[in-house]
Amino acid sequence: MDAIRIIKDEHFAIAAVLHALRHQIRAIRGGASPDFPLLRAILDYIVSYPDHWHHPKEDRFLFAAVRRRAPEAEALLGKLEREHALGYPMIETLKRQLVCFEADDDGAAEDFFATAERYATLEYAHLQTEEEQLLPLAERVLTEEDWREIDAAFRENDNPLFGIKPKEEAERLYQRILELAPPPIGYGRQDG
């Protein structure tokens, strides 16, 4: 089941980016200057990868297959789908708030920090639910035929809806975050 390994790898990358976001916010609150290029790179990653590629494949392939095989999982699947739907508007809000934060608008930094924390908390809980509840259920109820289709979808690099190679784009953005982020998150510039 390649899809489970791929999903867990993608979850790890998403969690690492969320950790970088929280780390930056803590640093700024601690007196560090805001690193706006890094914050933009983090939001770009979240928009281009989880919300435009990872979540739609989960919805279309994994969730649909589980729904066919385990109707009793409808409440769980509905919850996960709602969380997918909540993520994108929050990221759009974060992007607008980041512009205001960079312009030094009154209250913009705290607005950005609060929305970022809500998003990270939602996403961490979402990833945990998928890994602790959904994936074990999928392993129990899905057939080999189901897994062949799901595996193929998650192994595929091209996404015709967006005309990009999402894994390559995600890797480029992830590397950009590592280049911009100071240790211990990345290997980029260090203050002092």
Image (cartoon, grey):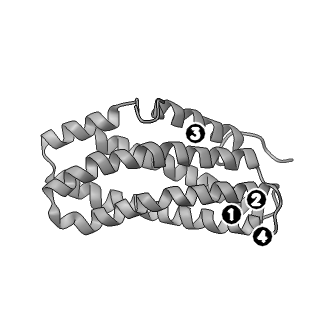
N-term mark: 4 or 1 = 4
Marker disc for residue 107: 4
Q: Which residue is drawn at 52% across and 66% down?
A: 121
CA neighbours of label 2 inside 10 A, class few (<14), some (14 to 19), many (20+): some
Kind of residue sitting beneath label 1: Phe
Q: In the shown orientation, is residue 140 left or right of residue 115? A: left
N-term mark: 4 or 2 = 2
Q: Distance between the residues labelled 2 and 3?
A: 24 Å
Q: Which of marks 1 and 3 is in front?
A: 1
Q: How far apart are marks 3 and 4 (CA)?
A: 29 Å
Residue 28 falls in which quadrant of the image? bottom right
> Compared to 98, does 177 lie above or below?
above
Q: Which residue is drawn at 76% across and 59% down?
A: 100
Q: What residue does disc 2 label?
A: 100
Kind of residue sitting beneath label 4: Gly
Q: What residue does disc 1 label?
A: 112
Q: How far apart are marks 4 and 2 (CA)?
A: 9 Å
N-term mark: 2 or 1 = 2
Indicate the secondary structure of the residue bearing disc 3: helix
N-term mark: 1 or 3 = 1
Q: Position of residue 6 (x, y in %)?
A: 36, 41
Q: Is residue 1 visible?
A: no
Q: What residue does disc 3 label?
A: 174
Q: Which residue is drawn at 70% across and 46% down?
A: 38
Q: Distance between the residues labelled 1 and 3?
A: 21 Å
Indicate the secondary structure of the residue bearing disc 2: helix
Along the viewing direction, whichever of 19 and 40 lies nearer the viewer:
40
Q: In the shown orientation, is residue 62 left or right of residue 71? A: right
CA neighbours of label 4 inside 10 A, class few (<14), some (14 to 19), many (20+): few
Q: Are marks 3 and 4 in contact (CB under 8 Å)?
A: no
Q: Do the residues labelled 2 and 1 touch (CB within 8 Å)?
A: yes
Marker disc for residue 91: none
